[in-house]
Amino acid sequence: MSGGADASVLDELPGEVMIWVLIVSELLVFGAGLAAFLAVRLSDPAGFAEAQDHLHRTGAALNTIVLISSGYLAARALQWRVAGRRVAARGALLVAAALGVVFLIIKGAEYADKAGQGITYETHPFFTFYYLLTGFHAAHVVAGIAILLLVAWRDAPRNIETGAAFWHMVDLVWVLLFPVIYLLA
Amino acid sequence: MTDMTPNTLSRAWLALIALSSGSAVIAELTGSGIDRRLVGVLIVGLALMKARVILSAYLGLSKAPTWRRGFNLSLALFCLLLLGLYLASGLTA
């Protein structure tokens, strides 16, 4: 009986169970990283604040808009595919992936600017966490772009649902990472 | 995730844009004499709201209330942890 009850709760989850296992795993990893960042910050809040002033808040805020807009298109793509509008769905997925590329370009410009200032991951513990967390997130964006392109090609609704869920996870991590790294002064 | 209406998704997207803009504006208030603790509370609060919108509308947990409650509670506790660590830095500074 309890097995049946467990199954009904799992059945409530939208999409594949395994994508939710991945989402929770990623949230735990990034969550631990952000908590560690703020814990280490306790040892040198002034140094962390000074280091944070070197970041481009405007570029990062723009990247937030880019990612949440991309997530919106991925979600709409699933709706269009279910409604039988395959061309619209594929177009939305391609634009969502293109916005992912825009995110990486802005992020790359930010990294190039830091490099130009001679800032590396060894400059200050702030930048160790900054490069680790934003770099790991950027790697997920690269993976997400590949997945969006893959499901645009193999566009079964179940594929799009899983690919979009991965992309929303990338989005979700960013809306937690952005304020902690860039805004909490 | 297929049960969202276009209007629901569009409202969620607009809400995320508004919340993100709000975060950026509030962050600019840090150097304007407003208590940084209040700014921190607002920034973390807005981040939590954004995460809830993504889970509910984009990831479709609005149709899975049990899971939505679980995720929301976990995220709220996590944000409290982040806020506590942030505010504690004021004690050590």
Image (spheres, coloured by chain):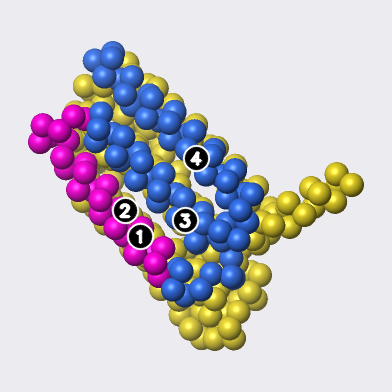
Chain in blue on the image:
B
Label 4 sits on a secondary structure element that is helix
**Marks 1 and 3, how far apart in space?**
10 Å
Residue bounds of the magenta highlight:
B10-36
Q: Which mark is residue B54?
A: 3
Amino acid tagged 4 = Leu
Q: Which residue is mark 4?
A: B75
Q: Crowdedness of circle 4 by 10 Å Cα count: few (<14), some, many (20+)?
A: many
Judge from the rendering whether residue B58 lies leftward or rightward of residue B39; answer left or right. right
Residue A50 visible: yes
Q: Residue A82, how many percent across, how many down?
A: 60, 79
CA separation in Å, label 3 and label 2? 12 Å
Query: For the residue labelled by badge 1, is the local secondary structure a helix, a strand or a loop?
Result: helix
Identify the chain of the residue marked 2, using the numbered disc in the image.
B
Residue A60 lies, in percent from the top left, at: 28, 50
- Dominant secondary structure of the magenta stretch? helix
Amino acid type for the residue under numbered disc 2: Leu
Q: Chain of mark 4?
A: B
Q: Is residue B15 above or below residue A159?
A: above
Q: Secondary structure at mark 2?
A: helix
Q: Residue at x 68, y 53 (%)?
A: A18
What residue is drawn where x is 29% and y is 39%? B42
In the picture of the structure, the residue carrying the numbered disc 2 is B19
Q: Colour of chain A?
A: yellow
- For disc 1, the chain is B
